[in-house]
Image (cartoon, grey):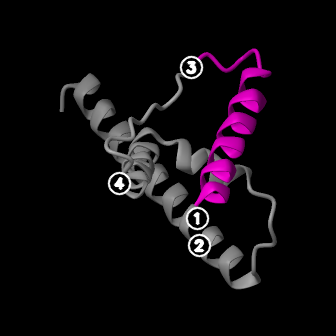
Amino acid sequence: MNSLARNISCSIRSSIHATASLHCYQQQWRGIRVKVLNGNLERAITFLQRKMRSSGIERLIKREQTHHIKNSEKRVLARKNLERKIRSQDLARKLKAILIKKVRGL
C-alpha cells in the first residue's frame, strides 16, 4: 500500500516539476489533498484516484511513462489519432462551407 502511494506521489511530483520547468506552460498547479478519516486508507486512496482521474493528472502521468508500447497498441493509437484528425478536418470543412454561405447571403 505504501509503495502505491509513494509511486503516485513521486510521479505527481515529477510531472509537476517537469511541466513547471517549461515557461510557456501557463496553468497553475495545485496539489490534491485527501483526508484520511478514521484511519480508512483504502477509502482515501480510492477517493484520491477518483480526484486524479477527474483533474487530468492521471493522463499526464500516463503520457510521461516511458515503458515499451506493443506494436498492436501503437497501431490502435495511430488509428484513433487518424480518425480524430479526419473528424476534425470534416468538421472544419463543414463549418467553412456554412460560413461561406452565410457571408454570401445564400
Query: Where the C terminus falls, by quadrant?
Result: top left
Q: Residue at x 62, y 58 (%)?
A: 4
The circle on residue 79 is 2
**Cβ–Cβ under 8 Å for marks 4 and 1:** no
Residue 78, placed above or below residue 86 = below
Range of magenta residues: 1-26
Circle 1 residue: 82
How far, Cα to Cα, is label 4 from label 1?
39 Å
Query: Where the N terminus falls, by quadrant?
Result: bottom right
Please state which amino acid type lies under the numbered disc 4.
Arg
Helix, strand or loop at label 1? It is helix
3 or 1: tag closer to the N-terminus: 3
**Cβ–Cβ under 8 Å for marks 1 and 2:** yes
* Circle 4 Cα neighbour tier, 10 Å, few/some/many (<14 / 14–19 / ≥20): some
- In-image side of 86 versus 106 (left or right): right
The circle on residue 43 is 4
How far, Cα to Cα, is label 1 from label 2?
5 Å
* Residue 78 horizontal/vertical position (percent): 65, 69
The mark lying in front, picked from 2 and 3, is 3
Circle 3 residue: 27
